[in-house]
Image: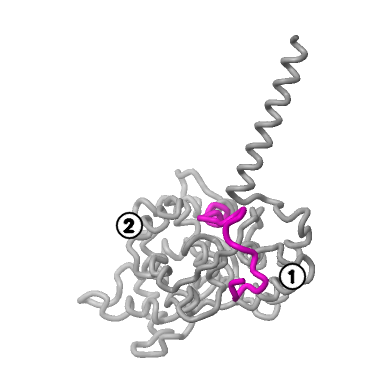
Amino acid sequence: MEGNCSSQRVVLVTLLLLIVATLVEGQGTRVGFYSSSCPRVESIVKSVVQSHFKSDPTVAPELLRMHFHDCFVQGCDGSILIDGPNTEKTAPPNQVLRGYEVIDDAKTQLESTCPRVVSCADILALAARDSVVETGGATWAVPTGRRDGRVSLASNAGNLPGFRDTIDVQKQKFSAKGLDTQDLVTLIGGHTIGTTACQFFSYRLYNFTSTGPDPSINPSFVSQLQALCPKNGDGSRKIELDTSSATRFDTSFFANWRDGKGILESDQRLWTDDSTKTFVQRFLGIAGLLGLTFNVEFGKSMVKMSNIEVKTGTAGEIRKVCSKVN
């Protein structure tokens, strides 16, 4: 009798585990999703990213931003990759993005190896991780299993985080996607690589207040920026977001905020607001505060972000060409 009860418990536990596994696989992503269907997916994407990075290192931050912009609009579904009039690509915040050819190249290779198996959304998530690694950041395990969305509308990109957003607005936009204040500071830390254009911050340098430039900018830094972005100059000129090491994924970007050298107004505000400043200080290892390791936390926040409103199971599709809906 006791043996039968024990056997029944084992069977019951096994069934429960199978049910849980089925629910998890059906509702979300998981690491190793393609281990059987396309075992070389990660090595193929990595190889493509490395090849493009070797010829153009500036593509790394572009792929990271592209994944971020994709996830914040209808979830991480690759909808930012779709061509056409009035698609997400055409929205003002996305018009400056580059690197689509990297995703296309990876998709072409994967279609030859595993036709109609790997989603464009997953390729983008993997490429973003590999781009961070190429610039000196730490790697992390990327859950996969996303399907591609069929809808891409420029009008849906209107709520992307903006360079003039207040802290309250930034928090609201991140919270709406299930991301907390630490995720906000951590993910914005991704600006440690890449550039922005003069048009997105030069207003801070001239007549920002009745007495002159934005007072949150270090006075000695103002003159440097004015030389790079003269009044009525070329607004499209690219400026490094991390003036200390724009090609290296590190914490010097947070030090820039501390020193009044944040380029974007929305970024600099993360130091001047107490609710976000604490996390910046923890990344910088300020004495008396519990420290945080940026590389570790960035990977955690990226996984969290990459699962925003994902389409799995029977939702969405697997595109044959990332720029076209099937």
Q: Is 76 displayed left or right of 40 in the figure?
A: left
Q: Which mark is residue 168?
A: 2
In the image, farthest residue toward the left: 210
If the image is split into quadrants, where does the N terminus sit? top right
Counting from the top left corner in percent of width and height, residue 241 is at: 48, 72
Viewer-nearest residue: 47 or 82? 82
Rounded to the nearest angstrom, the CA distance separating label 2 from label 1 is 44 Å
Q: On the image, numbered disc 1 is attached to which residue?
A: 111
Residue 295 in view (yes/no): no
Q: Where, by quadrant of the figure, is residue 321 drawn? A: bottom right
Q: Which label's residue is closer to the chain start, 2 or 1? A: 1
Q: Residue 319 colored magenta?
A: yes
Secondary structure category for the residue under label 1: helix
Q: Are marks 2 and 1 in contact (CB under 8 Å)?
A: no
Give the amino acid type for the residue marked by disc 2 in the picture. Asp
Label the magenta part by its dominant secondary structure. Answer: loop
The residue closer to the viewer here, 166 or 23, is: 23
Name the residue at the top extreme: 1
Q: Is residue 121 above or below residue 274?
A: below
Q: Position of residue 306 (x, y in %)?
A: 56, 57
- Which residues fall within the magenta stretch? 301-326
Q: Is residue 85 left or right of residue 201?
A: right
> Element under label 2?
helix
The C terminus lies in which quarter of the figure?
Answer: bottom right
Residue 214, percent across and down? 30, 72
- Of residues 291 and 317, the one drawn nearer to the viewer in this rendering: 317
Q: Is residue 181 visible?
A: yes
Residue drawn at x 46%, y 85% as measured from the top left:
237
**Rendered view: 217 above or below 179:** below
Check disc 1: other Cα within 10 Å, few if <14, some if 14-19, many if 20+.
some
